[in-house]
Image: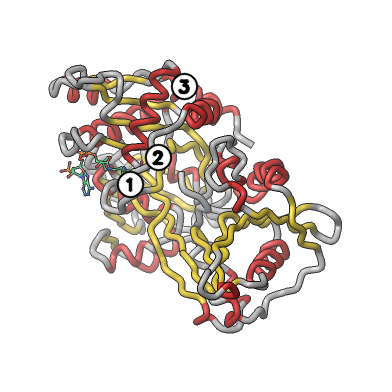
Amino acid sequence: MVSDTLASLAARQRTAPVDEESASRLAAGGLELRLVTTDDERDAWTQSVARGFLDTERSAEQLAAVRERSTYRRAVGVYDPSAPEPAAPVGSVAGWVTGLTVPGGATLPTLAVSSVTVAATHHRRGIARALVEGELRTAAALGVPLASLTVSESQLYGRYGFGAAVPVTSWRIDNRRAGWIGPDPAGRVDFVSRERLRELAPALHERVRPRVVGELVLPDGQWDTFAGTRPDAKQAGKIRAVQYTDAAGEVRGLLAYSVDENLADYARSTATVSLLLADTPDAHAALWRFVLGLDLIGEVRASELSVDEPLRWMIADQRAAHVEVVDHHYVRILDVPAALEGRCYGAPGVLALEVTDPLGITGGRWVLRVDDGGRGVVEAWPDGAAAPAGATAVSLGVTELAIVYLGGVSLATLVAAGRATTSDMAHAARVLGWHEAPRLSFWY
Ligand SMILES: CC(=O)SCCNC(=O)CCNC(=O)[C@H](O)C(C)(C)COP(=O)(O)OP(=O)(O)OC[C@H]1O[C@@H](n2cnc3c(N)ncnc32)[C@H](O)[C@@H]1OP(=O)(O)O
Protein backbone atom coordinates (compact mmCIF):
# COMPACT_ATOMS: atom_id res chain seq x y z
CA MET A 1 0.00 0.00 0.00
CA VAL A 2 1.16 3.50 -0.76
CA SER A 3 1.89 5.25 2.55
CA ASP A 4 0.52 8.67 3.50
CA THR A 5 4.03 10.19 3.20
CA LEU A 6 4.32 8.86 -0.32
CA ALA A 7 0.84 10.07 -1.27
CA SER A 8 1.48 13.54 0.12
CA LEU A 9 4.89 13.84 -1.60
CA ALA A 10 3.25 12.67 -4.84
CA ALA A 11 0.51 15.30 -4.56
CA ARG A 12 3.02 18.10 -3.92
CA GLN A 13 5.26 17.01 -6.77
CA ARG A 14 2.35 16.96 -9.25
CA THR A 15 1.65 20.68 -8.80
CA ALA A 16 5.10 22.06 -7.90
CA PRO A 17 6.16 24.97 -10.12
CA VAL A 18 8.73 24.30 -12.82
CA ASP A 19 12.39 24.72 -11.89
CA GLU A 20 13.49 28.37 -12.20
CA GLU A 21 17.08 27.62 -13.21
CA SER A 22 15.97 25.47 -16.15
CA ALA A 23 13.21 27.94 -17.09
CA SER A 24 15.67 30.82 -17.31
CA ARG A 25 18.23 28.75 -19.20
CA LEU A 26 15.59 27.86 -21.80
CA ALA A 27 14.22 31.43 -21.88
CA ALA A 28 17.69 32.63 -22.91
CA GLY A 29 17.21 30.53 -26.06
CA GLY A 30 13.69 31.89 -26.70
CA LEU A 31 11.91 28.81 -25.24
CA GLU A 32 9.31 28.45 -22.47
CA LEU A 33 9.20 25.74 -19.79
CA ARG A 34 5.63 25.10 -18.57
CA LEU A 35 3.55 22.65 -16.60
CA VAL A 36 0.91 20.94 -18.74
CA THR A 37 -2.47 21.54 -17.13
CA THR A 38 -5.46 21.65 -19.52
CA ASP A 39 -6.84 18.74 -21.57
CA ASP A 40 -5.85 20.48 -24.82
CA GLU A 41 -2.30 20.95 -23.56
CA ARG A 42 -2.18 17.33 -22.43
CA ASP A 43 -3.36 16.11 -25.86
CA ALA A 44 -0.74 18.20 -27.71
CA TRP A 45 1.92 16.97 -25.27
CA THR A 46 0.86 13.32 -25.81
CA GLN A 47 1.11 13.77 -29.60
CA SER A 48 4.67 15.13 -29.23
CA VAL A 49 5.65 12.21 -26.98
CA ALA A 50 4.19 9.68 -29.45
CA ARG A 51 6.19 11.23 -32.30
CA GLY A 52 9.35 11.32 -30.17
CA PHE A 53 9.05 7.58 -29.48
CA LEU A 54 8.55 6.80 -33.20
CA ASP A 55 4.87 6.00 -32.68
CA THR A 56 1.87 6.94 -34.83
CA GLU A 57 -0.30 10.01 -34.33
CA ARG A 58 -2.80 9.36 -31.54
CA SER A 59 -6.53 9.03 -32.33
CA ALA A 60 -9.18 10.86 -30.31
CA GLU A 61 -9.96 7.58 -28.51
CA GLN A 62 -6.30 7.06 -27.60
CA LEU A 63 -5.93 10.62 -26.36
CA ALA A 64 -8.97 10.18 -24.13
CA ALA A 65 -7.57 6.89 -22.75
CA VAL A 66 -4.20 8.52 -22.00
CA ARG A 67 -5.90 11.47 -20.28
CA GLU A 68 -7.98 9.19 -18.10
CA ARG A 69 -5.03 7.01 -17.06
CA SER A 70 -2.32 9.61 -16.54
CA THR A 71 -3.75 11.90 -13.89
CA TYR A 72 -1.10 10.59 -11.46
CA ARG A 73 1.71 12.05 -13.63
CA ARG A 74 3.07 15.54 -13.78
CA ALA A 75 3.70 16.52 -17.39
CA VAL A 76 6.08 19.34 -18.35
CA GLY A 77 6.60 20.78 -21.81
CA VAL A 78 9.05 23.09 -23.56
CA TYR A 79 7.38 25.48 -26.03
CA ASP A 80 8.76 27.51 -28.91
CA PRO A 81 6.61 30.66 -29.33
CA SER A 82 8.20 31.29 -32.75
CA ALA A 83 7.07 27.89 -34.14
CA PRO A 84 4.17 27.80 -36.67
CA GLU A 85 2.14 25.76 -34.15
CA PRO A 86 3.38 27.07 -30.78
CA ALA A 87 0.88 25.01 -28.73
CA ALA A 88 2.73 21.81 -29.66
CA PRO A 89 5.61 21.27 -27.22
CA VAL A 90 9.11 20.74 -28.64
CA GLY A 91 10.23 18.99 -25.45
CA SER A 92 8.47 16.77 -22.90
CA VAL A 93 9.02 15.01 -19.60
CA ALA A 94 6.68 13.20 -17.21
CA GLY A 95 7.34 12.40 -13.56
CA TRP A 96 5.51 11.04 -10.55
CA VAL A 97 6.50 10.06 -7.03
CA THR A 98 6.08 6.38 -6.33
CA GLY A 99 7.65 3.71 -4.09
CA LEU A 100 10.85 1.74 -4.77
CA THR A 101 11.70 -1.43 -2.82
CA VAL A 102 15.24 -1.24 -1.39
CA PRO A 103 17.38 -3.91 0.34
CA GLY A 104 15.73 -4.83 3.63
CA GLY A 105 12.21 -4.41 2.23
CA ALA A 106 11.52 -0.70 2.89
CA THR A 107 9.67 1.27 0.21
CA LEU A 108 11.39 4.61 -0.42
CA PRO A 109 9.85 7.48 -2.40
CA THR A 110 11.33 7.83 -5.87
CA LEU A 111 10.68 10.27 -8.69
CA ALA A 112 9.80 8.03 -11.63
CA VAL A 113 10.84 9.86 -14.81
CA SER A 114 9.40 9.04 -18.22
CA SER A 115 8.42 10.44 -21.64
CA VAL A 116 11.61 12.48 -22.18
CA THR A 117 11.45 13.61 -25.82
CA VAL A 118 12.77 16.53 -27.83
CA ALA A 119 11.50 17.30 -31.34
CA ALA A 120 14.05 16.47 -34.04
CA THR A 121 13.80 20.13 -35.11
CA HIS A 122 15.09 21.26 -31.71
CA HIS A 123 17.44 18.54 -30.52
CA ARG A 124 21.03 18.98 -29.21
CA ARG A 125 20.36 22.45 -27.84
CA GLY A 126 20.23 21.42 -24.18
CA ILE A 127 16.43 21.00 -23.94
CA ALA A 128 16.53 17.46 -22.50
CA ARG A 129 19.23 18.49 -20.04
CA ALA A 130 17.11 21.43 -18.84
CA LEU A 131 14.04 19.19 -18.48
CA VAL A 132 15.76 16.34 -16.61
CA GLU A 133 17.88 18.53 -14.34
CA GLY A 134 14.87 20.72 -13.58
CA GLU A 135 12.66 17.81 -12.55
CA LEU A 136 15.46 16.33 -10.40
CA ARG A 137 15.99 19.65 -8.58
CA THR A 138 12.24 20.05 -8.02
CA ALA A 139 11.94 16.55 -6.52
CA ALA A 140 15.08 17.00 -4.38
CA ALA A 141 13.72 20.27 -2.99
CA LEU A 142 10.52 18.47 -1.96
CA GLY A 143 12.58 15.85 -0.08
CA VAL A 144 12.25 12.93 -2.51
CA PRO A 145 15.43 10.85 -1.85
CA LEU A 146 15.63 8.96 -5.16
CA ALA A 147 14.79 9.21 -8.85
CA SER A 148 14.54 6.33 -11.30
CA LEU A 149 13.80 5.54 -14.92
CA THR A 150 14.00 2.96 -17.69
CA VAL A 151 15.81 4.04 -20.84
CA SER A 152 15.56 3.98 -24.64
CA GLU A 153 19.36 4.37 -25.00
CA SER A 154 21.93 3.38 -22.38
CA GLN A 155 24.25 6.34 -22.71
CA LEU A 156 21.74 9.12 -22.03
CA TYR A 157 21.38 9.37 -18.25
CA GLY A 158 24.77 8.74 -16.57
CA ARG A 159 25.57 12.43 -17.10
CA TYR A 160 22.70 13.33 -14.74
CA GLY A 161 23.87 10.92 -12.00
CA PHE A 162 21.66 7.94 -12.91
CA GLY A 163 23.28 4.51 -12.55
CA ALA A 164 22.19 1.17 -14.01
CA ALA A 165 21.27 -0.35 -10.64
CA VAL A 166 19.05 -3.18 -11.86
CA PRO A 167 20.39 -5.28 -14.72
CA VAL A 168 17.84 -7.85 -15.91
CA THR A 169 17.84 -10.78 -18.32
CA SER A 170 16.07 -11.53 -21.61
CA TRP A 171 15.48 -15.22 -22.36
CA ARG A 172 14.87 -17.24 -25.51
CA ILE A 173 14.17 -20.84 -24.54
CA ASP A 174 14.03 -23.86 -26.83
CA ASN A 175 11.25 -25.32 -24.73
CA ARG A 176 11.30 -28.74 -26.43
CA ARG A 177 14.95 -29.13 -25.50
CA ALA A 178 14.83 -27.53 -22.02
CA GLY A 179 13.41 -30.50 -20.06
CA TRP A 180 11.55 -29.74 -16.85
CA ILE A 181 13.32 -30.79 -13.64
CA GLY A 182 11.57 -28.27 -11.38
CA PRO A 183 8.75 -29.02 -8.97
CA ASP A 184 5.24 -30.11 -9.95
CA PRO A 185 3.18 -28.05 -7.50
CA ALA A 186 -0.09 -29.34 -6.09
CA GLY A 187 -2.21 -26.32 -7.05
CA ARG A 188 -4.07 -25.81 -10.36
CA VAL A 189 -3.45 -23.73 -13.48
CA ASP A 190 -6.44 -22.26 -15.36
CA PHE A 191 -7.04 -19.92 -18.26
CA VAL A 192 -8.92 -16.81 -17.14
CA SER A 193 -10.19 -13.70 -18.93
CA ARG A 194 -7.95 -10.67 -19.38
CA GLU A 195 -10.46 -8.74 -17.28
CA ARG A 196 -9.92 -11.17 -14.39
CA LEU A 197 -6.14 -10.80 -14.71
CA ARG A 198 -6.61 -7.02 -14.61
CA GLU A 199 -8.74 -7.33 -11.49
CA LEU A 200 -6.37 -9.64 -9.58
CA ALA A 201 -2.96 -8.31 -10.63
CA PRO A 202 -2.68 -5.04 -8.62
CA ALA A 203 -3.23 -6.70 -5.22
CA LEU A 204 -0.98 -9.65 -6.11
CA HIS A 205 1.78 -7.29 -7.28
CA GLU A 206 1.53 -5.33 -4.03
CA ARG A 207 1.97 -8.60 -2.09
CA VAL A 208 5.05 -9.54 -4.13
CA ARG A 209 6.62 -6.11 -4.67
CA PRO A 210 7.89 -5.40 -1.10
CA ARG A 211 9.93 -8.64 -1.28
CA VAL A 212 11.64 -7.78 -4.57
CA VAL A 213 14.35 -5.13 -4.42
CA GLY A 214 14.18 -2.82 -7.43
CA GLU A 215 10.42 -3.18 -8.05
CA LEU A 216 8.18 -0.11 -8.10
CA VAL A 217 4.65 0.55 -6.94
CA LEU A 218 2.90 0.36 -10.30
CA PRO A 219 0.40 3.06 -11.30
CA ASP A 220 -3.01 1.47 -11.59
CA GLY A 221 -3.48 2.30 -15.27
CA GLN A 222 -0.40 0.28 -16.24
CA TRP A 223 -2.27 -2.92 -15.44
CA ASP A 224 -4.56 -2.17 -18.37
CA THR A 225 -1.48 -2.26 -20.58
CA PHE A 226 -0.46 -5.70 -19.25
CA ALA A 227 -4.00 -7.05 -19.56
CA GLY A 228 -4.82 -5.29 -22.84
CA THR A 229 -7.90 -3.79 -21.20
CA ARG A 230 -7.29 -0.18 -22.30
CA PRO A 231 -9.94 0.86 -24.85
CA ASP A 232 -7.10 1.84 -27.22
CA ALA A 233 -4.98 -1.34 -26.72
CA LYS A 234 -3.44 -2.73 -29.91
CA GLN A 235 -3.95 -6.46 -30.57
CA ALA A 236 -5.30 -6.98 -27.06
CA GLY A 237 -6.93 -10.25 -28.13
CA LYS A 238 -3.47 -11.82 -28.53
CA ILE A 239 -2.93 -11.72 -24.78
CA ARG A 240 -3.75 -14.99 -22.99
CA ALA A 241 -4.23 -14.89 -19.22
CA VAL A 242 -3.62 -17.73 -16.76
CA GLN A 243 -3.86 -18.01 -12.99
CA TYR A 244 -2.31 -20.39 -10.49
CA THR A 245 -4.41 -21.33 -7.47
CA ASP A 246 -2.75 -23.08 -4.54
CA ALA A 247 -4.10 -26.20 -2.84
CA ALA A 248 -5.91 -23.99 -0.31
CA GLY A 249 -7.81 -22.22 -3.11
CA GLU A 250 -5.86 -18.93 -3.02
CA VAL A 251 -4.74 -17.31 -6.31
CA ARG A 252 -0.96 -17.10 -5.97
CA GLY A 253 0.21 -16.44 -9.50
CA LEU A 254 -0.73 -14.76 -12.78
CA LEU A 255 0.69 -15.15 -16.26
CA ALA A 256 0.09 -13.15 -19.44
CA TYR A 257 1.54 -14.33 -22.73
CA SER A 258 0.92 -14.01 -26.45
CA VAL A 259 1.65 -16.30 -29.37
CA ASP A 260 3.13 -15.60 -32.81
CA GLU A 261 2.50 -18.34 -35.33
CA ASN A 262 5.41 -19.71 -37.33
CA LEU A 263 3.81 -20.03 -40.77
CA ALA A 264 6.72 -22.11 -42.12
CA ASP A 265 6.45 -24.65 -39.30
CA TYR A 266 3.28 -24.29 -37.27
CA ALA A 267 4.60 -26.58 -34.53
CA ARG A 268 7.49 -24.19 -33.88
CA SER A 269 5.51 -21.07 -33.01
CA THR A 270 6.66 -18.57 -30.38
CA ALA A 271 5.13 -17.70 -27.01
CA THR A 272 6.17 -14.42 -25.39
CA VAL A 273 5.61 -13.98 -21.68
CA SER A 274 4.68 -10.38 -20.84
CA LEU A 275 3.86 -10.92 -17.15
CA LEU A 276 4.69 -13.67 -14.68
CA LEU A 277 3.71 -12.63 -11.20
CA ALA A 278 4.20 -15.22 -8.47
CA ASP A 279 3.59 -14.89 -4.75
CA THR A 280 5.14 -18.28 -3.87
CA PRO A 281 7.87 -20.54 -5.31
CA ASP A 282 5.11 -23.03 -6.20
CA ALA A 283 3.23 -20.44 -8.25
CA HIS A 284 6.46 -19.44 -9.99
CA ALA A 285 7.33 -23.04 -10.87
CA ALA A 286 3.80 -23.99 -11.93
CA LEU A 287 3.46 -21.05 -14.33
CA TRP A 288 6.86 -21.67 -15.96
CA ARG A 289 6.10 -25.38 -16.22
CA PHE A 290 2.81 -24.53 -17.94
CA VAL A 291 4.30 -22.13 -20.47
CA LEU A 292 7.27 -24.38 -21.34
CA GLY A 293 4.84 -27.23 -21.97
CA LEU A 294 2.53 -25.40 -24.42
CA ASP A 295 1.64 -27.36 -27.57
CA LEU A 296 2.76 -26.02 -30.95
CA ILE A 297 5.36 -23.77 -29.29
CA GLY A 298 9.06 -24.16 -30.16
CA GLU A 299 10.41 -21.06 -28.47
CA VAL A 300 9.43 -19.21 -25.30
CA ARG A 301 10.61 -15.64 -24.84
CA ALA A 302 10.61 -13.61 -21.67
CA SER A 303 12.38 -10.46 -20.55
CA GLU A 304 12.87 -8.27 -17.49
CA LEU A 305 13.72 -11.38 -15.46
CA SER A 306 16.21 -11.38 -12.60
CA VAL A 307 19.87 -12.03 -13.44
CA ASP A 308 19.50 -14.82 -10.88
CA GLU A 309 16.19 -16.17 -12.26
CA PRO A 310 15.48 -19.56 -10.60
CA LEU A 311 14.18 -20.93 -13.94
CA ARG A 312 17.81 -21.74 -14.82
CA TRP A 313 17.72 -24.40 -12.10
CA MET A 314 14.37 -25.83 -13.15
CA ILE A 315 15.42 -26.93 -16.65
CA ALA A 316 17.58 -29.95 -17.38
CA ASP A 317 19.47 -28.38 -20.27
CA GLN A 318 20.66 -24.86 -19.42
CA ARG A 319 21.97 -24.37 -22.97
CA ALA A 320 18.42 -24.61 -24.23
CA ALA A 321 18.10 -21.05 -22.93
CA HIS A 322 19.88 -18.09 -24.51
CA VAL A 323 20.14 -15.50 -21.78
CA GLU A 324 21.20 -11.91 -22.35
CA VAL A 325 21.92 -9.43 -19.57
CA VAL A 326 20.67 -5.89 -20.22
CA ASP A 327 20.72 -2.64 -18.26
CA HIS A 328 17.16 -1.86 -17.21
CA HIS A 329 16.29 0.12 -14.08
CA TYR A 330 18.35 3.26 -13.50
CA VAL A 331 18.47 4.98 -10.13
CA ARG A 332 19.58 8.50 -9.18
CA ILE A 333 20.26 9.33 -5.54
CA LEU A 334 18.91 12.79 -4.62
CA ASP A 335 19.60 12.63 -0.87
CA VAL A 336 22.56 10.43 0.09
CA PRO A 337 21.91 10.23 3.89
CA ALA A 338 18.18 9.45 3.44
CA ALA A 339 18.90 6.86 0.75
CA LEU A 340 21.64 5.17 2.80
CA GLU A 341 19.54 5.06 5.98
CA GLY A 342 16.58 3.69 4.03
CA ARG A 343 18.19 0.41 3.01
CA CYS A 344 19.72 -2.51 4.94
CA TYR A 345 23.24 -3.87 4.42
CA GLY A 346 24.96 -7.19 3.84
CA ALA A 347 27.43 -6.97 6.74
CA PRO A 348 28.23 -4.71 9.75
CA GLY A 349 30.98 -2.12 9.46
CA VAL A 350 31.87 1.56 9.22
CA LEU A 351 32.34 3.23 5.83
CA ALA A 352 33.72 6.74 5.35
CA LEU A 353 32.11 7.81 2.08
CA GLU A 354 33.12 10.64 -0.25
CA VAL A 355 30.50 11.11 -2.94
CA THR A 356 30.84 13.55 -5.83
CA ASP A 357 27.77 14.86 -7.63
CA PRO A 358 28.34 16.77 -10.91
CA LEU A 359 24.90 18.40 -10.59
CA GLY A 360 25.59 19.57 -7.02
CA ILE A 361 22.37 18.03 -5.65
CA THR A 362 23.74 15.68 -2.98
CA GLY A 363 27.54 15.29 -3.06
CA GLY A 364 29.51 15.30 0.20
CA ARG A 365 31.21 13.26 2.94
CA TRP A 366 29.40 10.94 5.33
CA VAL A 367 30.13 8.13 7.75
CA LEU A 368 27.86 5.09 7.44
CA ARG A 369 27.73 2.84 10.54
CA VAL A 370 26.06 -0.51 9.97
CA ASP A 371 25.07 -2.58 13.01
CA ASP A 372 24.91 -6.37 13.34
CA GLY A 373 21.30 -6.36 12.13
CA GLY A 374 22.30 -4.64 8.88
CA ARG A 375 20.69 -1.27 9.79
CA GLY A 376 22.69 1.81 8.79
CA VAL A 377 23.02 5.21 10.46
CA VAL A 378 24.61 8.14 8.62
CA GLU A 379 26.59 10.97 10.24
CA ALA A 380 28.07 14.05 8.62
CA TRP A 381 31.83 13.85 8.05
CA PRO A 382 32.94 17.49 7.88
CA ASP A 383 35.60 18.58 5.40
CA GLY A 384 39.03 18.52 7.02
CA ALA A 385 37.95 16.11 9.79
CA ALA A 386 39.74 12.75 9.97
CA ALA A 387 37.74 9.60 9.22
CA PRO A 388 36.72 7.62 12.34
CA ALA A 389 39.37 5.09 13.44
CA GLY A 390 38.89 1.75 11.70
CA ALA A 391 36.53 3.12 9.03
CA THR A 392 36.88 1.82 5.49
CA ALA A 393 37.27 4.68 3.00
CA VAL A 394 35.07 4.60 -0.13
CA SER A 395 35.28 7.28 -2.77
CA LEU A 396 32.92 7.32 -5.74
CA GLY A 397 30.57 9.40 -7.88
CA VAL A 398 26.84 9.64 -7.27
CA THR A 399 26.27 7.51 -10.42
CA GLU A 400 28.48 4.74 -9.01
CA LEU A 401 26.76 4.91 -5.62
CA ALA A 402 23.46 4.43 -7.45
CA ILE A 403 24.85 1.42 -9.34
CA VAL A 404 25.69 -0.40 -6.07
CA TYR A 405 22.75 1.01 -4.07
CA LEU A 406 20.32 -1.87 -4.63
CA GLY A 407 22.98 -4.57 -4.27
CA GLY A 408 22.71 -5.66 -7.91
CA VAL A 409 26.33 -4.77 -8.69
CA SER A 410 29.21 -5.31 -6.27
CA LEU A 411 31.44 -2.42 -5.26
CA ALA A 412 34.30 -4.85 -6.02
CA THR A 413 33.19 -4.84 -9.67
CA LEU A 414 33.17 -1.04 -9.85
CA VAL A 415 36.62 -0.88 -8.23
CA ALA A 416 37.89 -3.39 -10.80
CA ALA A 417 36.35 -1.21 -13.52
CA GLY A 418 38.21 1.84 -12.18
CA ARG A 419 34.99 3.60 -11.19
CA ALA A 420 35.41 3.65 -7.40
CA THR A 421 38.24 3.45 -4.88
CA THR A 422 38.32 2.02 -1.37
CA SER A 423 40.83 1.21 1.35
CA ASP A 424 39.39 -2.30 1.83
CA MET A 425 37.56 -3.68 -1.18
CA ALA A 426 36.38 -6.97 0.31
CA HIS A 427 34.95 -5.34 3.43
CA ALA A 428 33.28 -2.41 1.63
CA ALA A 429 31.78 -4.78 -0.95
CA ARG A 430 30.37 -7.05 1.78
CA VAL A 431 28.79 -4.11 3.62
CA LEU A 432 27.19 -2.63 0.50
CA GLY A 433 26.20 -6.03 -0.93
CA TRP A 434 22.86 -7.79 -0.76
CA HIS A 435 21.98 -11.47 -0.92
CA GLU A 436 19.36 -11.30 -3.70
CA ALA A 437 19.60 -9.78 -7.16
CA PRO A 438 17.23 -6.84 -7.69
CA ARG A 439 14.65 -6.88 -10.46
CA LEU A 440 12.14 -4.59 -12.14
CA SER A 441 9.57 -6.54 -14.13
CA PHE A 442 8.28 -3.79 -16.45
CA TRP A 443 9.15 -0.62 -18.40
CA TYR A 444 7.79 2.80 -17.57
C1 LIG B 1 13.32 8.18 -19.38
C2 LIG B 1 13.05 8.28 -20.86
O1 LIG B 1 12.10 8.87 -21.23
S1 LIG B 1 14.13 7.57 -21.97
C3 LIG B 1 13.69 8.21 -23.53
C4 LIG B 1 14.63 9.20 -24.13
N1 LIG B 1 14.00 9.74 -25.33
C5 LIG B 1 14.12 9.16 -26.56
O2 LIG B 1 14.82 8.18 -26.76
C6 LIG B 1 13.30 9.77 -27.68
C7 LIG B 1 14.16 10.14 -28.89
N2 LIG B 1 15.25 11.08 -28.54
C8 LIG B 1 15.02 12.36 -28.18
O3 LIG B 1 13.89 12.81 -28.09
C9 LIG B 1 16.22 13.24 -27.89
O4 LIG B 1 17.24 12.92 -28.79
C10 LIG B 1 16.75 13.13 -26.45
C11 LIG B 1 15.62 13.39 -25.45
C12 LIG B 1 17.34 11.74 -26.19
C13 LIG B 1 17.87 14.13 -26.24
O5 LIG B 1 17.33 15.44 -26.32
P1 LIG B 1 18.26 16.72 -26.64
O6 LIG B 1 17.47 17.93 -26.30
O7 LIG B 1 18.81 16.60 -28.00
O8 LIG B 1 19.42 16.52 -25.58
P2 LIG B 1 20.36 17.69 -25.04
O9 LIG B 1 20.69 18.64 -26.15
O10 LIG B 1 19.79 18.27 -23.80
O11 LIG B 1 21.65 16.86 -24.69
C14 LIG B 1 22.05 16.59 -23.36
C15 LIG B 1 23.27 15.72 -23.43
O12 LIG B 1 22.91 14.42 -23.92
C16 LIG B 1 23.69 14.09 -25.07
N3 LIG B 1 22.81 13.35 -25.97
C17 LIG B 1 21.62 13.71 -26.40
N4 LIG B 1 21.09 12.75 -27.17
C18 LIG B 1 21.99 11.76 -27.21
C19 LIG B 1 22.03 10.50 -27.85
N5 LIG B 1 21.00 10.04 -28.58
N6 LIG B 1 23.11 9.73 -27.66
C20 LIG B 1 24.16 10.17 -26.90
N7 LIG B 1 24.16 11.36 -26.28
C21 LIG B 1 23.10 12.14 -26.43
C22 LIG B 1 24.13 15.43 -25.63
O13 LIG B 1 25.31 15.29 -26.39
C23 LIG B 1 24.33 16.24 -24.38
O14 LIG B 1 25.56 15.89 -23.79
P3 LIG B 1 26.33 16.88 -22.77
O15 LIG B 1 25.35 17.91 -22.29
O16 LIG B 1 26.77 15.99 -21.68
O17 LIG B 1 27.42 17.46 -23.57
Whether the residues at callouts 1 and 2 have beta carbons within 8 Å, the answer is yes
Is residue 72 visible in the rendered image? The answer is: no
49 or 15, which is in the foreground?
49
User: Assess mark 3: CB under 8 A from ligand 1?
Assistant: no
Which quarter holds ligand 1? top left
- Residue at mark 1 to residue at mark 2: CA–CA distance: 8 Å
Marking on residue 162: 1
Relative side of 310 to 337, left or right: right
Count the labels in the image: 3
Q: Earlier in the sequence, mark 2 or mark 3?
A: 3
Marking on residue 147: 2
User: Three-letter amino acid code at disc 3?
Assistant: Arg
17 or 201, which is in the foreground?
201
Q: Earlier in the sequence, mark 1 or mark 3?
A: 3
Q: Earlier in the sequence, mark 1 or mark 2?
A: 2
Is residue 262 visible in the rendered image? The answer is: yes
Residue 339's x, y, as percent?
43, 42
Whether the residues at callouts 2 and 3 have beta carbons within 8 Å, the answer is no
Q: How dense is the environment of label 2, judged by Cα within 10 Å: few (below 14), some, or many (20 and up)?
A: many
Mark 3 secondary-structure assignment: helix
250 or 334, which is in the foreground?
250
Mark 3 lies on residue: 12
Q: How dense is the environment of label 3, judged by Cα within 10 Å: few (below 14), some, or many (20 and up)?
A: few
